[in-house]
Image (cartoon, rainbow, N blue to C red):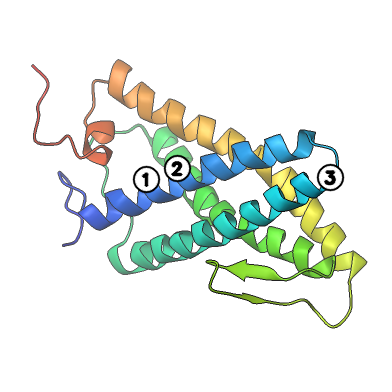
Amino acid sequence: MRDKQQVLSPITVGLHWMVAIGIVSMLAFGLYLDQLELTPRKSELIEIHKLFGFAVFLVAIARIFWRYINGFPIPIDALQKWEQVLARATHWLLLLSTILMPISGIMISLGLGYSVPVLGITEFGPLPERSKLLADTGYFIHGNLANVLIGLIVLHSAGALKHHWIDKGQTLRRMLALHQWQRP
């Protein structure tokens, strides 16, 4: 089932919320990890972060693939031109960020000479040689993009809440699959 203007497909809604919950969880976990001193326990937690990060990466790829097949949802509410431009830019940047965050994490692991777990089933890496450039580039992207991604999530959420509470629109209800219940 493909998206319609009034109703988003279960695939669209499911992928959106899986990626959203996964990315927000990984950001929170990553911020927590940043506060810890390097100990064996922190190393164990980093492995968990990598494991779940790769799972989120696969779901994000599926979401982008679905977006390519299905296209972006047609706005359900009337938007001003600046809202349309901002919404489109934010959506594209969110999609790109959900791919670049895990890729930059993979760059860190491989650059430091570690392998990357794939769903706890297998792993790839390590590289034949460590690469300081690869690790440093990964750290730079991962750390800075985390802050950008947090800002994008806040902007995206604020836009959804504005459309819901101020404009009295149906956009959020559609993404929550509440389209069958109309406002009184």
Q: In whole angstroms, how far apart are the C-alphas of marks 2 and 3? A: 28 Å
Residue drawn at 82 percent across, 60 percent down: 137
Q: List the residue tagged with mark 1.
A: 17
Q: Which residue is mark 2?
A: 21
120 relative position to 146: left or right: left
State whether residue 118 is above or below residue 38: below
Q: Which image quadrant for residue 182?
A: top left
Numbered badge on residue 177: none
Q: Which of labels 3 and 1 is toward the front?
A: 3
Task: Where is residue 4? Give x, y as percent.
Answer: 16, 52
The one nearer the camera, 132 or 78, is 132
Are there few (<14), some (14-19), or many (20+) residues within 10 Å of tag 2? few
| Residue 84 shown left or right of residue 52 in the figure | left
Residue topped by disc 3: 39
Question: What's the residue type where badge 1 is placed?
Answer: Trp
| Amino acid residing under circle 2 | Ile
Determine the secondary structure under disc 2. helix
Q: Is residue 78 visible?
A: no
Residue drawn at point x = 55 percent, y = 38 percent = 152
Q: Locate the N terminus and report the quarter of the image it occupies.
A: bottom left
Q: Are marks 2 and 1 in contact (CB under 8 Å)?
A: yes
Residue sitting farthest toward the right: 132
Q: Quadrant of residue 54?
A: bottom right
Give the amino acid at mark 3.
Answer: Thr
Determine whether 78 is above or below 47 in the image.
Answer: above
Q: Position of residue 49 (x, y in %)?
A: 63, 51
Q: Residue 121 at what x, y percent from top left?
A: 53, 73
Q: Secondary structure at mark 1?
A: helix
